[in-house]
Structures are given as structure tokens and as C-alpha cells.
Image (cartoon, helix red, strand yellow):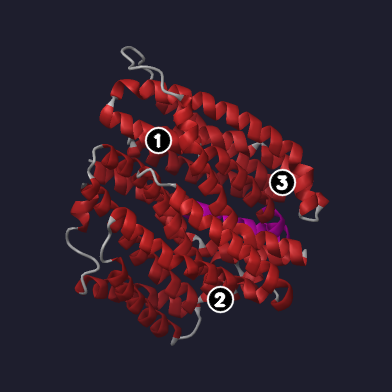
């Protein structure tokens, strides 16, 4: 049953992020590069702050719910209740601060006209917080089918509401859409919650859950989530600051949006890794944790590598499909950005495994070091070598991470075979890239070669043992 729920959740995540790309594609076409650049700067900062709420207390609650399911089910209602109190308090404070600082954000970005957009965007934060609370409530209870429904609902609303409002009301409409969509999903979540009565029963509770436990876990989770988003978006802010060109910012964000496709595909794994790793460590089943993490890494490498190959081989065609002719200049950013964000996305997903194992400090230290290195590179290189150096700098940052990440994985989870599988996958990816590139960057070549080259890639991995028969059985477990 759990394997079926995972499949539905993965499909829901896939559809959800497809809807996100539909929204981005429509926004780019309806707004144009300049207005799209203004939108990108404001929404990335807003969602960065929203992660203070959505990726902190709810994820901590999810972890404790999973542990209590295994050890002390009578304590579950108290976990939910205390988490809700903490979520409401933190949301109120953060939203108020963001609203008051809106003119300051616009001033730091050297564009006072962004202030009204920041005011509107501040209202997104509490809606996002309430939505995230319910989503991770169902995650902690391992009700993955309910999560799937919520994701499907959000996907449909994103396409209809955000794209529609952007078409009619332009840049103001897209922010209003971002406000209305989580409210709609929240309504469905509350309805499901009332009907299923998840953790409303308080008779026989084993005591009051300490809110200090939530904060102790939520703070490092929040720190990591915010730092990771800063790492990915840092160059976007640097371009805005150094060059003050909204069209250029829009071009770069369009390329970054496409480059982040693997991270969105991998996101479903985060919803599984945190509760299952936490449960495994609570039961002292380290062998199960090892298998889960090992297969997650292998899955990400298998899926992410061919994406990088095709984007690197057909950057102009991919950009034309997603954003149209106005954004073709961004195609020069794509190859290196795709490789960099795919590597960094693996760190993001694995942070949830570290968190489940009680070692969230490890990915925090990694991402903090990368941010400092990225800032140093931007300050030293961008003013001298210009915009074209941005994707190269991001790739350098990502490659610096790789040996430290895999060494840490081996030390924490005793994972073997990652390097050997990585070599096989890298070889197949390079072959796919050169074959694809030899036919030229055209929509026809992309359409004709993607499927046969993809099949050949998977066949090679099957015959070399990277993909195995028992993979489906492992997912079921």
C-alpha cells in the first residue's frame, strides 16, 4: 500500500511542478523579460522568507509525529497542538517584520518601485505557513495519499488562477494569484482534516509535548532551507545589484527556473526520507536507513544526469519551448546552470535524511561554506568578467561540494558503491550528450532523439548493474 502511495505522491509532485513550469512559461510570455525580472526578484525573496515558516516547524512536527507513531501513539495529539501554537506565533512575527521591511528590501535592490509588490507579497507568507502545516501533518502521519490530493489541487489552481490573473492584471495579478492558491489548498486540507479527524482524540494522552523540542529541531531545519534558497538565488540578487538590469535578471531567472527541474522532481523524496529515516533510527534499524538513502542517491543520479545532457545539448531549443523567443539570450546560461543545480539539489534532498538521523548540522555547515565561497566569487569575478561568468561560478561552487558530500554520506550512512555508480552514470551521460549534440540544436533533433537516447541510456545502466530488479521491492519496503 505504501509503494502505491509513493507512486501517487511522486505523480502528484510531478504534476505539481509541471504546473509550476506552466505558470512560469505563461508569466514569461505575458510579462516579458523586464517585468518577469521584477517579479522574480520579489517572489524569490518572499518565498525565501516563507521557508522560515513552511520548512521549519511543520517539518519538525512531521519528524516527531513519525517517531511517536513508532514509540508512543498517545502522544501524537500533543505534538500537533503544540506545533500549531508555535506555527501561529512565528508566522505572525515573521509576516509583520516582512511587511514593515518591504521598503528596505526595495531600497537595497536599488528599485523603490518594488515596494508595493513587496507589500502584496507579504500576505503570501501566512497563507503558505498554514498550507505547509497541514501538508506536513499528513506527511508525519504517513498519509501520503492525502498529500497527493493536496498537490493535485494546488497544481490545478496554480495553472487556472495564477496564469489567469497574470493575463488580465499582469504583474499585480501574479502576486494575487500566489496569495489565493494556498488559501484554496488550505480549504481542502481543513476539510479533509475535519472528516478524518487526524489527531483530534485527546483521551489517554501520554503527556504534553514540549514545545522546546519543536524549536530545537525547527531552527536548524529552517536555517538550512533558507541558506539553500539563498545559495540558489544569490546570483540573481548579484545581477540585480551589480547591473540594475531587470531584463537581464529576467533572462537569468528563466534559465535558473529550467535548471531547477531536477530539484522539483526530487522533492517527493524529501517527503519520504524525513519520516522513514526518523522511524528507522527510532527503531535502531540502521540497515534500512542505509538502503533508503543509497537508493535515493542512485535515483537522483540516474534521473538528473540525462536531464543535464539534453539541456546542455539543446539549450536554445529548451529555452524556446519554455519561455519563447524573447528569452533565447538565456540559453547561454543553461548548460552549466543545469549541472550546478542538479548537484546542489542532491544536497537539498539528502539534508532531510541527515535531519531524520539527527545530524542536520552537517548539511548546514556545507551550504554555509558554499554561500561564503559563492559571495567571494561573485564579488571578485562579476564586476570584471560580466554576466557570462555567472553559470561558470555556480558550477565551480557545486563541484566543490561533491567530494565533501559523498565522503560525509559514507561516514554517516555507510553507503557503498556511490562513486562506482556515479562513474557509470557519468560515462553514459557524456555519450548521450555528444550524440545528441552532433545533430545540432534544433527542436526536431530534440523531439526525435530524446526517447531513443533515453532508452539507450537506461539500457546501459541496466546492463552495468546501476539499475537493478530489486529496486521496486526496495521502494515497497
Ranked by sequence position, the earlier of labels 3 and 2 is 3
- Residue 154 versus residue 90 in the image, above or below: below
Instruction: List the single residue furthest toward the front.
Output: 411
Is label 2 in a helix, a strand or a loop? helix
Is label 1 in a helix, a strand or a loop? helix
Q: Nearer the viewer, mark 3 or mark 1?
A: 1
Q: Which mark is residue 316?
A: 2
Q: Quadrant of the N terminus?
A: top left
Q: Is residue 36 magenta?
A: yes
Query: Residue 369, percent across and down?
Result: 54, 59
The residue wearing badge 3 is 172
Q: Which mark is residue 383?
A: none
Q: Is residue 347 magenta?
A: no
Q: Which residues fall within the magenta stretch?
A: 18-39
CB of mark 3 within 8 Å of CB of mark 2? no
Location of residue 434 (image quadrant)? bottom left
Query: Residue 431, percent across and down?
Result: 36, 82
Q: CA distance from mark 3 to mark 2?
A: 30 Å
Q: Which mark is residue 62?
A: 1
Query: Residue 137, percent across and down?
Result: 41, 32
Q: CA distance from mark 1 to mark 2?
A: 42 Å
Amino acid at each position: 500500500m505504501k509503494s502505491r502511495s509513493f507512486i501517487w505522491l511522486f505523480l502528484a509532485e510531478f504534476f505539481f511542478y509541471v504546473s509550476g513550469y506552466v505558470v512560469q512559461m505563461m508569466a514569461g510570455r505575458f510579462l516579458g523579460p523586464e517585468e518577469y525580472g521584477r517579479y522574480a526578484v520579489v517572489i524569490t525573496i518572499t518565498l525565501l522568507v516563507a521557508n522560515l515558516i513552511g520548512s521549519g516547524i511543520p517539518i519538525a512536527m512531521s519528524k516527531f509525529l513519525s517517531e511517536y507513531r513508532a514509540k508512543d501513539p498517545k502522544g501524537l495529539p500533543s505534538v500537533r497542538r503544540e506545533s500549531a501554537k508555535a506555527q501561529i506565533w512565528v508566522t505572525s512575527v515573521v509576516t509583520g517584520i516582512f511587511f514593515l521591511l518591504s521598503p528596505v528590501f526595495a531600497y537595497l535592490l536599488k528599485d523603490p518601485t518594488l515596494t508595493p509588490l513587496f507589500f502584496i507579497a507579504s500576505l503570501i507568507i501566512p497563507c503558505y505557513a498554514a498550507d505547509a502545516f497541514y501538508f506536513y501533518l499528513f506527511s508525519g502521519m504517513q498519509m501520503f495519499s492525502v498529500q497527493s490530493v493536496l498537490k493535485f489541487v494546488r497544481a490545478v489552481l496554480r495553472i487556472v488562477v495564477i496564469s489567469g490573473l497574470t493575463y488580465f492584471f499582469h504583474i499585480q495579478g501574479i502576486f494575487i494569484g500566489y496569495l489565493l492558491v494556498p488559501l484554496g489548498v488550505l480549504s481542502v486540507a481543513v476539510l479533509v482534516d475535519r472528516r478524518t479527524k487526524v489527531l483530534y482524540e485527546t483521551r489517554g494522552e501520554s503527556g504534553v509535548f514540549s514545545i522546546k523540542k519543536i524549536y530545537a529541531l525547527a531552527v536548524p531545519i529552517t536555517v538550512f532551507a533558507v541558506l539553500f534558497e539563498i545559495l540558489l538565488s544569490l546570483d540573481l540578487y548579484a545581477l540585480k545589484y551589480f547591473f540594475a538590469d531587470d531584463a537581464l535578471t529576467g533572462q537569468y531567472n528563466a534559465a535558473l527556473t529550467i535548471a531547477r527541474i531536477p530539484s522539483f522532481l526530487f522533492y517527493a523524496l524529501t517527503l519520504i526520507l524525513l519520516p522513514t529515516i526518523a522511524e528507522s533510527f527510532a527503531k535502531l534499524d540502521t540497515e534500512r536507513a542505509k538502503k533508503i538513502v543509497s537508493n535515493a542517491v542512485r535515483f537522483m543520479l540516474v534521473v538528473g544526469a540525462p536531464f543535464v545532457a539534453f539541456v546542455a545539448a539543446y539549450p536554445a531549443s529548451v529555452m524556446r519551448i519554455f519561455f519563447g523567443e524573447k528569452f533565447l539570450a538565456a540559453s547561454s546560461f543553461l548548460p552549466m546552470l543545469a549541472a550546478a543545480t542538479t548537484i546542489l539539489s542532491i544536497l537539498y534532498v539528502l539534508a532531510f535524511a541527515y535531519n531524520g538521523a539527527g545530524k542536520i548540522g552537517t548539511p548546514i555547515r556545507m551550504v554555509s561554506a558554499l554561500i561564503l565561497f559563492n559571495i567571494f566569487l561573485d564579488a571578485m569575478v562579476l564586476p570584471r568578467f560580466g554576466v557570462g561568468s555567472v553559470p561558470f561560478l555556480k558550477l565551480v561552487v557545486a563541484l566543490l561540494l561533491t567530494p565533501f558530500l559523498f565522503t560525509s554520506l559514507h561516514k554517516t550512512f555507510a553507503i557503498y558503491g556511490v562513486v562506482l555508480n556515479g562513474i557509470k552514470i557519468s560515462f553514459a551521460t557524456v555519450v548521450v550528450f555528444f550524440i545528441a549534440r552532433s545533430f545540432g540544436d534544433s527542436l526536431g533533433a530534440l523531439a526525435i532523439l530524446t526517447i531513443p537516447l533515453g532508452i539507450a541510456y537506461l539500457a546501459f545502466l541496466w546492463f552495468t548493474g546501476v539499475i537493478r530488479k530489486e529496486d521496486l521491492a526496495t521502494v515497497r519496503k
